[in-house]
Amino acid sequence: MTTKVRACIFCGGTGLTREHIFPWWVRRAVGGQGRAHHAMSAGEQHWLEHGRAPRYTRHWDDDELELTVRCVCKQCNNTWMNRLDEEAERQVGALAAATPLTVVGAELAVIATWATKIAMLLELTRRPSGLTRRRALVPPSQHAELFQLKQPPASASLWVARVAPPWPGVWWRTAPLSLTWIAPEAVSRYGSPSASLITCAFGAVAFQVLFAPPVDFFRDEGARRTEDGADFMRRLWPEQQLVWPPPKALRLEALEKFAQ
Ligand SMILES: [Zn+2]
């Protein structure tokens, strides 16, 4: 009998450790609190039709912002992931406080890479899907691409929105997006589901990461999303510059709709 050893999602190494998804400084960025509101849609038997509200089958609250996942190795955890957390702290902290700032080039890549890493780890908290046998809806090649390039993989599009009033903790959602409904011709090439939307808000900032194959539907959808959110949201990646904050903010009540 062989025992399957789970490997690090990023480097493939062994010796997995518990990774705290949110670094300690997120608590400080949201005012010293650390409440977390979690929700995820299961999508184990069937996938959501696009445009239909997802039913979040798991909802839970924590007083402490202590969300961990066991999918990365000690080496990754203690080296580049730690560095990425440190490098992102100042700028992401400013976004969470709605402090005006303009970010360009390498600093923009740091924010986008950090938010992508968080989104990937949040996805790994899912139960294994009955269809894919994996927890993550993002294909493993995309984890490897982030590790190798230290930037969001080719399938990732990111947005950043301003939220008011600031959320005193962390609020996040993960939801699968079905290619079967959206682009049936792409299913044989990319598999299904191969698209996933992750939204994560803390303080005055919400990050949204869409992992999707480069099919017309998602390109159009991305452009529409950017246009619809012009008042309160900016495209973060792939972009050259971020001017923060947007003129208006997304009301907290609207976050749920935004996460779909
Ligand atoms: Zn690793």
Image (tube, rainbow, N blue to C red):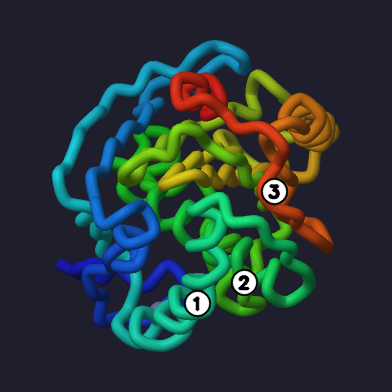
Q: Residue at x 43, y 39 (%)?
A: 166
Q: Nearer the viewer, residue 161 or 216?
A: 161
The residue tagged 1 is: 84
Judged from the image, the secondary structure of the residue bearing numbered disc 1 is: helix
Tell me: residue 214, above or below residue 243.
above
Asked whether disc 2 touches disc 3, contact meaning CB atoms under 8 Å apart, the reply is no
Question: Residue 217, relative to residue 242: is it above or below?
Answer: above
The C terminus sits in image quarter:
top right
Marks 2/1 in contact by CB < 8 Å: the verdict is yes
User: What residue did someone put label 3 on?
Assistant: 157
Nearest to N terminus: mark 1 or mark 3: 1
Q: Is residue 194 visible?
A: no
Mark 3 burial class by Cα count in 10 Å: few <14, some 14-19, many 20+: many
The quarter of the image holding the N terminus is: bottom left
Local packing at callout 2 (Cα closer than 10 Å; few below 14, some 14-19, many 20+) is: many
Left or right? Give the position of 179 relative to 201: right
> Which label is found at residue 212?
none
Q: Could you say which disc has been placed on residue 110 in the image? A: 2
| Residue 141, position as x, y percentages in the image | 59, 62
Which of label 2 and label 3 is nearer to you? 2
Q: Residue at x 72, y 37 (%)?
A: 247
Say which element carries label 3.
Answer: strand
Horizontally, residue 75 falls left or right of residue 61, namely right
What amino acid does circle 1 point to? Leu
